Image (cartoon, coloured by chain):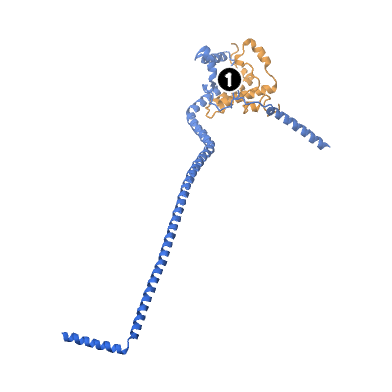
Chain colours: A orange, B blue
């Protein structure tokens, strides 16, 4: 599987048009339904190759796109989400410098 | 030699590419509409406070009720601020003022901008649909025209029938005219024959009379004439004497 290829599991004659937000492999238990004691096994079953991680991010991106950006009449929500997300991200990467601006020594 | 190697490697690469490409299509199988329906463009996801997904509130709702998520948010913010995990440096106040400006701008200009953009979206969609609807309409018009043409063709059949009847009438008229013509011609000839025979009889009679008269006058001698004259005079005298 190189760059620009479809996932290996995707079969056009069965799955129809390609949906970039969809996982075409064998579905595992959804994360929200995983019990705490099954969590270790669930994490061990995950494919942690760089391609799979990139694919997971890509699917999340497209799910967000399909839900908030691509519908016909969207409001300001996706822009505010992007704004908030980028604010949080840059706050996190600058957190080491922000720490020096603390006013109180003891809490 | 080198070019041949390059060619061979290129061919090999192409064949592997074909195999890789084929693996997706070769496997085949029936289309699974049940589990993999055709994606459709949905409505935008619901949000609260401008950007927080509704689902996060629903996640809280079953456990904590309506105010739970707000309580959680405010409580978390309070915790982060009070422990100074969230550090409020000078940029924080810039952010607050920016957020206020964004809020006011969204409240002031938002509705009119939304209306304008929705109108644009609709107009673009109409533009894209226009050729399709126009094509459908033109095809429907063509079907209508075709039906009209068929109806007219049926009218043509009636017309042809009427023309045929007309031709039959003309033939009948011509036949009758010729019949009349033949009758008048025969009558004319018969009239001619009658007239001719009449004339012949009259001429022969006249000739006979002339002949008889001329022969009779020729046969009268001067003696007889004299006798007749005398006789006449005697008769005249007798008539005169009787008076």
In the image: residue B100, left or right of residue A57 = left
In the image: residue A46, left or right of residue B225 = right
Q: Nearer the viewer, residue B158 or A2?
A: B158
Q: Residue at x 34, y 85 (%)?
A: B219
As drawn, which residue projects farthest toward the left? Answer: B243
| Label 1: chain letter | B
Image quadrant for the N terminus of chain A? top right
- Where disc 1 sits, the SS reads loop
Spot occupied by residue B232 in the image (x, y as percentages of width and height) = 24, 86
Q: Nearer the viewer, residue A97 or B159?
A: B159
Spot occupied by residue B205 in the image (x, y as percentages of width and height) = 36, 76
Q: Nearer the viewer, residue B215 or A52?
A: B215
As drawn, which residue projects farthest toward the top? Answer: A37
Residue under pointer 1: B89
Q: Residue at x 61, y 25 (%)?
A: A62
Q: Nearer the viewer, residue B137 or B235?
A: B235
Image quadrant for the C terminus of chain A? top right
């Amino acid at each position: 599987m190189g760059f620009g290829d479809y996932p290996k599991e995707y079969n056009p004659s069965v799955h129809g048009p390609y949906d970039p937000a969809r996982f075409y492999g064998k579905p595992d238990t959804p994360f929200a339904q995983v019990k705490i004691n099954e969590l270790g096994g669930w994490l061990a079953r995950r494919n942690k190759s760089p391609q799979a991680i990139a694919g997971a991010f890509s699917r999340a991106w497209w799910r967000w796109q399909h839900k908030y950006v691509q519908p016909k009449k969207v409001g300001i929500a996706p822009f505010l989400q992007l704004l908030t997300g980028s604010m949080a991200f840059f706050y996190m990467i600058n957190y080491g410098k922000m720490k020096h601006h603390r006013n109180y020594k003891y809490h | 030699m080198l070019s041949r190697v390059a060619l061979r490697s290129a061919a090999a690469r192409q064949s592997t590419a074909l195999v890789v490409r084929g693996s997706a299509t070769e496997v085949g199988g029936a289309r699974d509409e049940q589990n993999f329906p055709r994606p459709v463009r949905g409505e935008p996801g619901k949000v609260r406070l401008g950007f927080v997904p509704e689902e996060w509130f629903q996640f809280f709702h079953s456990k904590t009720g309506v105010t739970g998520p707000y309580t959680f948010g405010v409580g978390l913010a309070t915790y982060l601020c009070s422990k100074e995990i969230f550090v409020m440096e000078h940029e924080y106040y810039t952010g607050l003022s920016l957020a206020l400006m964004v809020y006011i701008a969204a409240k002031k200009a938002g509705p009119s901008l939304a209306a304008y953009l929705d109108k644009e979206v609709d107009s673009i969609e109409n533009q894209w649909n226009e050729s399709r609807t126009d094509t459908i309409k033109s095809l429907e018009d063509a079907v209508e025209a075709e039906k009209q043409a068929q109806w007219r063709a049926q009218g043509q059949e009636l017309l042809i029938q009427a023309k045929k009847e007309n031709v039959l009438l003309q033939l009948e008229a011509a036949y009758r005219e010729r019949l009349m013509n033949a009758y008048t011609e025969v009558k004319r000839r018969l009239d001619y024959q009658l007239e001719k025979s009449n004339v012949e009889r009259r001429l022969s009679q006249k000739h006979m009379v002339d002949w008889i008269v001329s022969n009779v006058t020729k046969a009268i001698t001067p003696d007889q004439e004299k006798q007749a004259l005398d006789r006449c005079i005697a008769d005249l005298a007798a008539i005169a004497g009787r008076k």
